[in-house]
Amino acid sequence: MIAIKTILCPTDFSEPSREGLKYAIELATLFSADLCLTNIVPAIPPLPTNPNFVFEIPEYERGLHADAEHKLREMIERIPKSLKVRTVIGHGDPGAEIVRIAEDERADLIVIATTGMTGFRHFLFGSVAEKVVRLAACPVLTVRAPVARA
């Protein structure tokens, strides 16, 4: 039998990632596995050194980090108390960070949502899920967002 002890579920707090979380919760329940929720805070590019430009990057990054912590805590409140859940916040490139966190947490499975972008949008924005599938050492379950019906 497959031993799944830790499931990593990345979230960007979007509707598709909430759908991925449903699958992660169900699988964690079935396998009595720990659930690790993660959010990746984007890297802030260097800004101009113009003395008239006032923007405190460390303060902004702390705000993003605090917001991610708050949203992750809200998500945990809706997860059954029978599951052991922990959170990790990463920084930088989402795909690479998710893979790094999966390795650090010794995840046996990554459950990640995909928006299913195709064509030009996919070319422009790439796919975090696709990068995770290519780079992860453990199995990856991709969950496609439900298609809106007319």
Image: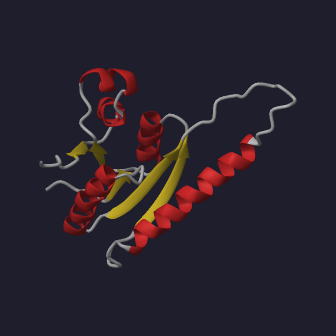
Q: Is residue 82 above or below residue 50?
A: below
Residue occupying the point 38% across, 70% down: 84
- Please tell me which residue is depicted at 26% across the width and 56% down the height of the picture: 19
Which quadrant of the structure image shows residue 77? bottom left
Q: Is residue 26 left or right of residue 126?
A: left
Q: Nearer the viewer, residue 93 or 1?
A: 93
Residue at the bottom extreme of this rendering: 81
In the figure, residue 123 lies in which quadrant?
Answer: top left
Residue 92 at x, y = what percent? 55, 37
In terms of image quadrants, where is residue 2? bottom left
Which quarter of the rendering shows the N terminus?
A: bottom left
Q: Where in the figure is residue 125, as x and y percent of width and height?
A: 39, 27
Q: Nearer the viewer, residue 119 or 143?
A: 119
Looking at the image, which residue is at 61% across and 58% down?
Answer: 66
Question: Toward the viewer: 111 or 148?
Answer: 148
Q: Can residue 67 be spotted in the picture?
A: yes
Question: Would you say residue 108 is visible in this rendering?
Answer: no
Judged left or right of residue 76, residue 33 is left
Residue 12, image x and y in percent? Answer: 42, 49
